[in-house]
Amino acid sequence: MANQQTLLSPAELAYLHSSLSLSPPIRPDGRTAKQFRPLTAETGILPGTNGSARVCLADGTEAIVGVKAEIEKTVDPLGGEHYQEYVKSASGAGGGDAEEDKRGARGEWLEMTVEIPGLRDDDAGTVFLAELLREALLADGEFAKKLWINRRFHWRLYLDIILISPPLSYPLPLLSLTTHLALLSTRLPRLKSEGDEDPMFDDDWEASPFLYPRQGAAAGSRPPITLLVVAVGDSILFDPSKEELAVADSALAVSLCEVRTQKGDESMEVDSGRELRLVSMRTVDPPSRLTPPGVPSTGNFAASGTFDPSSQKKQQQQQQRVEEYPQEGVWKAPLGGTRFAVLDSIIRAVLEKGGVADEVLDGLEGVDLS
Amino acid sequence: MPLDTSTYSLALLRIDGRRWNDLRRLHAQIHTQDAADGSSYLEMGHTKVMCVVTGPAEPQAGQKKGTVGSAQATGQKEGASIVVNVVVAGFSSVDRKRRGRNDRRIQEMEITIQKALAANLHTHLFPHSTITVSLHVLSQDGSLLAALINATTLAVIDAGIPMTDYITACTAGSTSSYAAGDDAADPLLDLNTQEEQELPYLTVGTLGDSDKVAVLVCESRVQVSRLEGMLVVGVDGCKQVRRLLDGIVKQKGRKMIKEGAVRRSDMMAVSLDD
């Protein structure tokens, strides 16, 4: 998906690259480096699911996420012995510590699929996207614990992501934001049974608790969001469009989540800022690596208008030199990995207080959850 | 899940309280998405589908050779080829069930829609190009194929692709099963999932206000004597659906003129006030 080719000539690529590496960068759509595209979002659109959300970005791309939960019997990987032990300790101590038991929660209880129209569902790019989002969700280890019911049963959560529109730009931020909202609106039926009984649930949907409680003592972490950040020259750009991704030196998918820490009674001041935590980071292969290099006009006899067979050798030498040394205004596909300084500045920019992440999370908080 | 249809004969009311010739609530929107050439959203009862039309556009590389899981127009060298993709979301049914792209049922729906479109769109106006129709099923509760066809019609109209007339579809069934020999069986209009599982039914699509049948799919065993009654009810239902869709298209057109997206022309035959 990221390798989708854009139809830009080397000259256009060079122009884009140089205007984006200015300080401040000049982006084709007039945004500032840290500005997100506006989006519209709604949640709870599908009553048949446990949670759902729809997000439309300003460029017209649209995604829908539906969450479905099923009850599943927990199969002990250690072949049942473990369970016996649990029963013994539980009967001895009169009910074990739930927190202790929840350590048995496993990440595989969450299943995630991404559907992109026109692509096969086992396409490498699609699978990579799904895994990227899943990894970010499970990274803090708290998520699987939410699916734990008792020692014998757990929820299996299916998260299906559908991209409705044709993929115009790399859909990672869109899918991530939609997933975030869908999870925030997800509710699971309220448990009525106690202990390790077969689970019984309250059939009143209004009484069902949210997977991510918002108020009260249980209000804790929020689902993570994944932002796509690209580095072009020395500038760091958020939420790149397709053209910007086509000239990126490196592209990074940065996942972060918001942590709400309970403060003691001494610090009763108003919670002004949120605490952001980096959960995972992945490099995304930008399509710029596959672009053909430009030819400088000195080495191009179609431009100079003279063709001298004796100078052919010289030109070949020049060609080699061009490949070795980048020339201003001549496009050359980026090579090699990401420098540490770039990584560092990306992380700083992402975690900065009042930065893009704050702006996005503020925006998402404004969405009415039904 | 067997359904107890024996109560029908008592009050002549169906499980959801409808009479035999009642349609479910039909709600639709056109141009739901800015990035696509044409798009629509359609609800028939609890069946919810979205349609996105791209094109007519230059065929993408690789599409010529026949993409996996999509229906290809064949034998159409001059006109635009039509590619239909149906994606059934995992969360669309009551129990989550993942259906692959190569599911037979889905492929058959793709081919049915593609053939209906190929026969009624003026594809000869767009040589060497492709019209891609992506359909997304968000929630299903019976009459899926009919909802897909109706959504496609709206999206194609939104994309501005010329066609002979609306293709509208709905389902029709019969109140008694194949084996039961009662002659008093009533035909039913617009079945939901519960009824579809129990009763014989067919999906019929007609062209515009005429009685011309563009699509007819029947997968269950029906007694021949009941077929005619079902077909008549189905065709009548299609006309009702056409009126509803036509109302939606006209409403959208009026809104576009009011917003100034389209210039009001002297040639306009429809008065804006009605």
Image (cartoon, coloured by chain):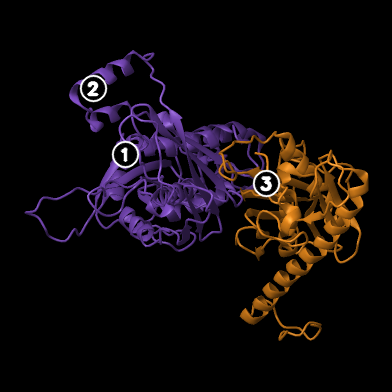
Chain colours: A purple, B orange
Q: Nearer the viewer, residue B103 or A83?
A: A83
Tag 2's secondary structure? helix
Mark 3 is surrounded, within 10 Å at the Cα level, by few (under 14), some (14 to 19) or many (20 or more) other residues, namely some
- Residue sitting at 63 percent across and 44 percent down? A117
Three-letter amino acid code at disc 1? Val
Res A279 label:
1
Residue B73, horizontal then vertical, whole percent: 83, 44
Q: Nearer the viewer, residue A162 or A249?
A: A162
Mark 1 is surrounded, within 10 Å at the Cα level, by few (under 14), some (14 to 19) or many (20 or more) other residues, namely some
| Image quarter of residue B54 | bottom right
Tag 3's secondary structure? helix
Q: Is residue B80 visible?
A: no
Res A88 label:
none
The answer to whether A77 appears left or right of B146 in the picture is: left
Reading the chain from its start, which is encountered first: label 1 or label 2?
2
- Residue sitting at 65 percent across and 44 percent down? B87
Q: How many marks?
A: 3
Q: Is residue A85 visible?
A: yes
Where does label 2 land, which residue?
A91
Q: Chain of mark 1?
A: A
Q: Nearer the viewer, residue A355 or A327?
A: A355
Q: Are marks 3 and 2 on the same chain?
A: no
Residue B41, horizontal then vertical, whole percent: 64, 59
Residue furthest front in the image: B10
Label 1, label 3: how many angstroms apart (C-alpha)? Answer: 45 Å
Q: Chain of mark 3?
A: B
Three-letter amino acid code at disc 3? Gln
Where does label 3 land, which residue?
B194
- Residue sitting at 49 percent across and 34 percent down? A128
Three-letter amino acid code at disc 2? Ser
Marks 1, 2: nearer the viewer: 2
